[in-house]
């Protein structure tokens, strides 16, 4: 078993680390409080080649697709700016989906601007009435002579306020026959589309919102993958986003832990540094252990992904374990700073609110444990007594 990085992976980590800590970290708090998306910083990240890592041979700065490298980039971004790291994950997902499943017209229109940081494509999967039960989606796509008419609602769409297009998952019908869910790339300026922003407690620059589609016309070329088989063809390999999301929490928590270790080493109480008290040092030691365990779990899942090996259970493990322990670490670090940590002038309370988002995104801990249980006990394991 080898835990070292390849030369290419180390190069990705080091280039992103240097840029993120020098250029992004100083402005995190100001950006995190704004509802404006920092496009300039996003384009600078694109300039490092990060958004091409899963976009196919033409755009990948590495010789081959490498999910571990993507994880390293995301973790290093999150150490400096949690929100920009989370903005990178949909780009990695969308470029991967478009490169693998879109027709030539869609690839030519969207891949280069996505990789260059000049455009953004969102994902429309969750709906107001079904949450993580994606088999219950109500959005419909009715086949016509020239394409499809799409109607419905999508909830909790990340970057909807700032996006240029969206991949919509919709139940598809053709000649009155239901074919199952399909995936369509829909420009967000198409007639029949409206957007409603959501006011969140954190993650503010991410522009989360509700999408309304009223008989939106798209051409046949908008279809990604096979009609009626989105979950098998387009979304069947979705698992890699979960360890990436976990790594954003881990990276942010690691930055907080490192800062707190420095603070308690200098802060004096009763004539001695706080770090000398076991009530201070032991919790930090425990959080360092949990974060390292979560990190290794994430890179194991991503390594299995790159190797083409099963990783559904591993991905679900990362998604509940990593964000949970990241949130706990940040909370305890805030408390160790005392009244200073509670101030909005410092990043601790902002990080605590931001990181809570990844305890929810892509399925809560409860959903992840259902997935793990199904992998353990087989598909006959069905919760809720159904």
Image: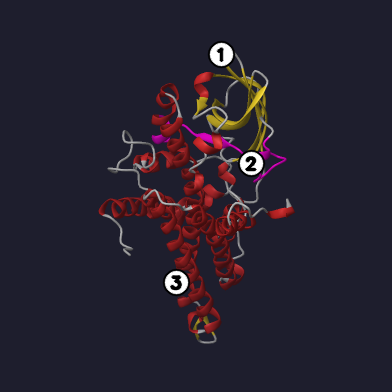
Give the numbered dot on residue 134.
2
| Whole-number angstrom distance, CA of label 3 to CA of label 2 | 45 Å
**Label annotation for residue 106:** none
Q: Position of residue 286 (x, y in %)?
A: 51, 74
124 or 141: which is nearer to us? 141
Please state, as top left, top right, bottom left or bottom right, where the N terminus lies in the image: bottom left
Q: Nearer the viewer, mark 1 or mark 3?
A: 1
Q: How many marks?
A: 3
Q: Say which element carries label 1.
A: loop
Name the residue nearer the viewer: 19 or 101: 101
Q: Mark 1 or mark 3: which comes first in sequence? A: 1
For this orientation, the residue located farthest to the top is 145
Task: Return the mark for residue 146.
Answer: 1
Residue 70 as seen in the image, left or right of residue 386: left
Residue 250 in the image: x percent, y percent?
A: 49, 60
Marks 2 and 1, Cα distance to the nearest angstrom?
27 Å
Does residue 134 show up magenta in the picture? yes
The answer to whether residue 368 is left or right of residue 127 is left
- Helix or strand or loop: what does disc 3 sit on? helix
Residue holding disc 3: 262
The span shown in magenta is: 113-137
Residue 113 in the image: above or below residue 47? above
- Give residue 102's quadrant in the image: top left
Magenta span: predominant SS is loop
Q: Reply yes or no: does residue 28 show up in magenta.
A: no
Q: Nearer the viewer, residue 79 or 177?
A: 177
Distance of label 1 from label 3 (alpha carbons): 63 Å
């Amino acid at each position: 078993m080898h835990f070292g990085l390849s030369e290419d992976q180390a190069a990705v980590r080091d280039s992103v680390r240097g840029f993120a800590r020098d250029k992004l970290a100083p402005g995190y708090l100001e950006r995190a409080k704004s509802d404006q998306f920092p496009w300039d910083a996003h384009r600078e990240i694109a300039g490092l080649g990060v958004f091409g890592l899963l976009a196919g041979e033409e755009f990948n700065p590495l010789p081959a697709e490498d999910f571990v490298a993507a994880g390293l980039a995301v973790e290093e971004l999150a150490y400096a700016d949690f929100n920009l790291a989370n903005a990178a994950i949909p780009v990695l997902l969308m470029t991967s989906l478009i490169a693998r499943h879109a027709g030539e017209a869609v690839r030519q229109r969207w891949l280069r601007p996505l990789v260059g940081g000049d455009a953004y494509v969102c994902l429309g999967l969750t709906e107001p009435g079904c949450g993580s039960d994606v088999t219950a989606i109500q959005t419909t796509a009715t086949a016509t002579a020239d394409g499809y008419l799409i109607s419905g609602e999508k909830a909790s769409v990340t970057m909807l306020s700032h996006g240029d297009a969206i991949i919509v998952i919709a139940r598809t019908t053709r000649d009155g026959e239901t074919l199952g869910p399909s995936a369509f790339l829909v420009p967000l300026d198409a007639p029949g589309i409206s957007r409603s922003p959501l006011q969140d407690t954190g993650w503010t620059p991410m522009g989360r919102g509700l999408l309304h589609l009223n008989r939106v016309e798209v051409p046949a070329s908008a279809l990604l993958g096979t009609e009626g088989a989105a979950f098998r063809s387009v979304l069947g390999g979705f698992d890699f986003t979960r360890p990436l999301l976990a790594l954003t929490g881990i990276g942010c928590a690691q930055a907080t832990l490192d800062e707190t270790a420095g603070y308690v080493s200098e802060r004096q109480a009763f004539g001695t540094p706080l770090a000398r008290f076991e009530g201070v040092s032991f919790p930090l030691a425990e959080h360092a252990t949990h974060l390292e365990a979560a990190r290794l779990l994430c890179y194991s899942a991503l390594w299995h992904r790159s190797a083409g090996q099963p990783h559904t259970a591993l991905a679900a493990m990362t998604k509940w374990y990593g964000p949970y322990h990241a949130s706990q670490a940040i909370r305890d670090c805030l408390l160790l700073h005392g009244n200073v940590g509670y101030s909005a002038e410092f990043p601790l309370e902002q990080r605590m609110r931001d990181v809570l988002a990844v305890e929810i995104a892509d399925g809560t801990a409860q959903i992840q444990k259902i997935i793990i249980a199904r992998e353990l006990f087989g598909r006959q394991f069905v919760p809720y007594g159904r």
